């Protein structure tokens, strides 16, 4: 059974009511809701953005989604993977640290990252990702 780690770009699509994002989220929930992950770095990205906008409704909607997922964090294993990704990307063009952490957490938890940010994530070796933005 596939495991999916939701990136902030996908979560924002869901919260904005984008039909493709909602359809895909419903499909993976129906398949097995225990295989949906939102890492703590994505939590930080999403909540910080909504608090900056003072959007209590969006924070509440996000929290409803978040509480029904697993929450992997940047533990030692993921941090070591993040270092490997940094070294790999350092030879070319780096991506933001948060994206490195999100990729590392997805890889060590054997998750497919659901993101619209394919331009950055396609450079990370060993990362499986999908873009469900249509």
Image (spheres, grey):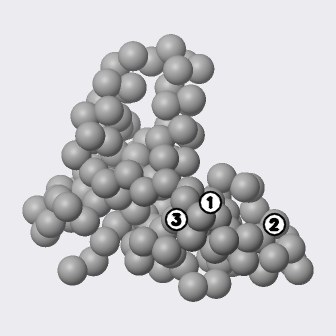
Q: Residue at x 72, y 55 (%)?
A: 97
Mark 2 or mark 3: which comes first in sequence?
Answer: 2
Q: Which residue is label 2 attached to?
A: 94
Give the Cα separation between the discs numbered 2 and 1.
Answer: 13 Å
* Mark 3 secondary-structure assignment: helix
- Element assignment for label 2: loop
Q: Which quarter of the figure is the N terminus placed in?
A: bottom left
Residue 44 percent coordinates (x, y): 54, 38
- What is the residue that sits farthest to the front in this orientation? 76
In the image, what residue occupies the spot 20% across and 61% down?
A: 34
Say which residue appears at 25% left-offset and 34% top-offset. Answer: 64
Could you say which is closer to the camera, residue 57 or residue 86? 86
Q: Which residue appears at 49% of the width and 54% of the height? A: 73
Q: Which mark is residue 35?
A: none
Instruction: Tell me the tag on residue 101.
Output: 1
Give 52 or 85, whichever is nearer the viewer. Answer: 85
Residue 25 image point, x, y percent: 25, 56
Task: Pinpoint residue 9: horizontal percent, then vertical percent.
Answer: 50, 50
Q: Is residue 84 above or below residue 5?
A: below
Q: Nearer the viewer, residue 9 or 77?
A: 77
Query: Which residue matches tag 3?
Result: 105
Say which of marks 2 and 1 sits in front. Answer: 1
Within-10-Å neighbours for mark 1: few <14, some 14–19, many 20+: many
- Asked if marks 1 and 3 touch (Cβ < 8 Å), the reply is yes
- Left or right placement of residue 116 versus residue 123 in this view: left
Q: Is residue 39 visible?
A: yes
Q: Earlier in the sequence, mark 2 or mark 1?
A: 2
């Amino acid at each position: 059974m596939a495991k999916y780690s939701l990136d902030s770009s996908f979560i924002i699509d869901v919260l904005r009511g984008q039909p493709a994002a909602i359809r895909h989220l419903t499909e993976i929930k129906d398949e097995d809701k225990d295989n949906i992950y939102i890492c703590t770095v994505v939590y930080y990205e999403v909540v910080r953005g909504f608090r900056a906008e003072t959007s209590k409704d969006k924070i509440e909607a996000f929290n409803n989604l978040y509480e029904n997922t697993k929450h992997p964090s940047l533990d030692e294993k993921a941090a070591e993977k993040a270092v490997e990704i940094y070294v790999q990307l350092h030879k070319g063009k780096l991506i933001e640290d948060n994206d490195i952490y999100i990729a590392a957490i997805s890889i060590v938890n054997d998750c497919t990252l659901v993101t619209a940010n394919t331009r950055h994530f396609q450079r990370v070796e060993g990362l499986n990702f999908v873009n469900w933005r249509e």
